[in-house]
Image (cartoon, rainbow, N blue to C red):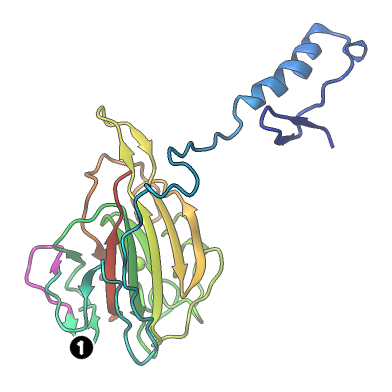
Amino acid sequence: MLAQKSILGRSVPGAPSALPPALVLKSGQMRIRYLLPLALTAFAASVPVIKWKTGDRSRPLPAMVTPGEPSTQEHAGTAPSDAVQLFNGRDLSAWQQHNGKPIAWKLGDGYFEVAPGAGDIVTKQPFGDCQLHVEWATPNPAHGSDQEPGNSGVYLHSLYEIQVLESNRNKTYADGQAGAIYCQYPPLVNPARPPGEWQTYDIVFHGPRFSADAKLLEPATVTLLFNGVLAQDHVMPTGPTDYMKRPPYKVTPPKLPLLLQDHGQPVRYRNIWIRELPAE
Ligand code: MG
């Protein structure tokens, strides 16, 4: 296979090797044979420069964090010591109805549940880039088919939905099942548990960046571990979630509430916590 070494020593697949001038018959071909590899080297990856020396003892040490305990099906786990607890099993004080009415979702024994028809709920506090842990369970027995059973959703920045759905036995379109960035990216694999069992989403989210003159500088990024299995690997949403559409980004503030969707199904949630990440 033809390949050309860049200045960093990386092979550039498909780029032609330099050939002896005797084999180059026309000036146009010569330009392609010699200038294309040079052009490709201009796009070679750059490596970050670390301002600290290796093993530099003047470099600040990371903050100590006490890790949480993992959940079991019977018991909710706990949050890391530096997390904001968004539901600790006892009250919904961190949440409000998106429509401004008093909270109507139902509090159970260590969990809360969508009140179908009451509307979405949002956190009172807005968040920027974050690590987010959410546990959810779809109703057992399941009700309906396709986009019905156990439909809810975790909306990052209230705009980008990670789908919640009964996807262990229920079939729907690929970018509509549990773990999908809804109507954009299917999960890499389907590690969904059966209806009624507790499932976990561990999410790393970076919001989009905009310039002062309202241009998109960087799309949002989402990484998702679904029941501990990588389901979204640093994907870039194409814009806010919409029903069977992919609208473009609109300028949004760097911090927005987290939203949980009421899609008419009594989906349960427990053990929700969030760690805001420092702005880059
Ligand atoms: Mg949904």
Image quadrant of ligand 1? bottom left
**Is ligand 1 closer than 8 angstroms to the Cβ of mark 1?**
no
- What residue is drawn where x is 31% and y is 85%? 76
Placement of the N terminus among the 4 image quadrants: top right
Q: Which image quadrant is residue 274 in? A: bottom left
Q: Which image quadrant is residue 98 in? A: bottom left
Q: Main secondary structure of the magenta part?
A: loop
Q: Is residue 264 visible?
A: no
What x and y, as percent, mark residue 40? Answer: 66, 26
What x and y, as percent, mark residue 118? Answer: 16, 73
Above or below, 122 relative to 36: below
Crowd tier of the residue under label 1, counting other residues whose Cα lies within 10 Å: few below 14, some 14–19, many 20 or above: some
Q: Is residue 98 magenta?
A: yes
- What residue is drawn where x is 50% and y is 65%? 231
In the image, taking residue 136 as reference, residue 4 lies left or right, namely right
The total of numbered circles placed on residues is 1
What x and y, as percent, mark residue 238? Answer: 42, 46
Q: Which residues are magenta?
A: 95-105
Placement of the C terminus among the 4 image quadrants: top left
Please name whichever residue, 52 or 22, is drawn nearer the observer in this view of the structure.
Answer: 52
The residue singled out by tag 1 in the image is 108
The three-letter code of the residue at mark 1 reads: Gly
Q: Is residue 106 visible?
A: yes
- What residue is drawn where x is 31% and y is 60%? 63
Above or below, 231 relative to 50: below
Q: Is residue 30 magenta?
A: no
Q: Secondary structure at mark 1?
A: loop
What x and y, as percent, mark residue 2? Answer: 83, 33
In the image, taking residue 5 as reference, residue 61 lies left or right, namely left
